[in-house]
Image: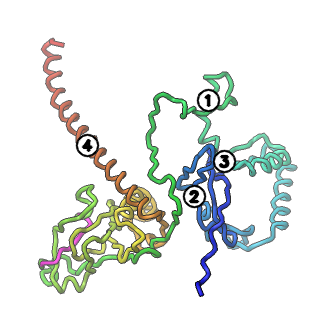
Amino acid sequence: MKGSSAPAETWQPTACILCSRNCGVEVAVEDGHLKRIRGDKASPLSRGYICQKATRLEHYQNNADRLSAPLRRRPDGSFEEVSWEVAVAEIAGRIRAIRDAHGGRALAYYGGGGQGNHLGGVYGRGLVAAMRTRYHYSALAQEKTGDFWVNGRLFGRQTCHVAEAVEEAENLFAAGISSLFASLDGCVFSRIEDICEVVRGGSPRPAGSPTYYGGDIPFFKVGDLTKDDGKFLYTAESSVNDLGRAQSRFIEADTLMLTNSGATLGVPKITKIAGCFNDGSQAFLNLQRSVNIEFAYYFFKSKTPWFREVSARGQGQPNLNTAMTRRMEMPVPTLDVQRRIVSELDGLHVEVNALKAAQVETAAELDALLPSLLDRAFKGEL
């Protein structure tokens, strides 16, 4: 008897509310969770397009850090869970007391609907009226003030809001926009610790001792990973012997690495030779077959500024520990999509390098031109 097949997924059409575009999406729901999310090709606006924000709707809706009930602060600074009825009653009582004692000008409201979700704005207007305040702030104050001002200058009133007719433009210049992560059908987000093993290297002590160093095993240091902007690592400046290997960590060729200390932390590299590496870097072992190593390389490369910002907070020497890396989430689309993204990023990398070379050449020409111009100026030839 043939075994019963798994039930087919049921896709439900809806819309993303994380920005003003409200792109159409389709979701597969299971036990109250968005198990899969994809662009809705039937949407007349987005036509199947989907960005990274929409693919993470499940994270925003059900992530482990989201509050599921009101929390009231205790005198010792800790929190206790209370019911919604208690929370609303206590907050309303405090707001009413401030309003009655000092008037509505003592209160201000921040919040309301975002560009895509206006439900909060409906309730917010009622609260603003009850507080009797004229001060109502939202993210639009920071994001759209310039837009409102320009509309006022162009059309005579700031409430005249216009949108760009991109589809009717004869010429369009777009900066910082890419379709690389569009239409990630079936994309899931996985923790790094769920797709590989994250390990830190080891450094034989004392450094440079002939007891451990000077053998025929390459020994990768941070400087080897950061000496150029290339994707691959082919050589190492240092080496260790078998005793040094026992005090370090050995990795095979085609292993993804990431620097984790100092001013140059957060730099990824794929080693093309086997060797040991010091404690200034991490390595990602046993990468699942569902992940393209070069796709993972570009993911970590995109996170370099974030690594350095987060790791530098509150300490003198920036340091990226493996626990932080393990907890990170990475998008994992299909392998075909990963390969496409890698190919496009490779092409962009070539173009960027060409522009850098042209910039250096132009700067050299200008440096050579300046002395000549100065000489002619003081000779009265200009």
The residue pinned by badge 2 equals 38
Secondary element under disc 1, as helix, strand or loop, is: helix
Secondary element under disc 2, as helix, strand or loop, is: strand
Mark 1, mark 3: which one is toward the viewer?
A: 3
Left or right of 303? Residue 239 is left
Q: Is residue 185 in view from this perspective?
A: yes
Q: Is residue 103 in view from this perspective?
A: no
The reply to whether dot 1 and dot 3 touch (C-beta < 8 Å) is: no
Give the residue at x 53% y 63%: 186
Amino acid, disc 3: Gly
Where, quadrant-wise, is the C terminus in this rendering?
top left
The residue pinned by badge 3 equals 116
Q: Residues within 10 Å of mark 2 (few under 14, many from 20)?
A: many
Q: Earlier in the sequence, mark 2 or mark 3?
A: 2
Q: Where residue 203 sits in the image (x, y, percent)?
A: 25, 78
Secondary element under disc 4, as helix, strand or loop, is: helix
Q: Earlier in the sequence, mark 2 or mark 4?
A: 2
The reply to whether dot 2 and dot 3 touch (C-beta < 8 Å) is: no
For the residue pair 289 and 286, the one nearer the viewer reads as: 289
Left or right of 239? Residue 181 is right
Q: Earlier in the sequence, mark 1 or mark 4?
A: 1
Give the residue at x 23% y 64%: 233
Amino acid, disc 1: Trp
Assign the magenta stretch its main secondary structure. strand
Q: Earlier in the sequence, mark 2 or mark 1?
A: 2
Q: Magenta segment, which residues?
A: 216-223
Q: Residues within 10 Å of mark 4 (few under 14, many from 20)?
A: few
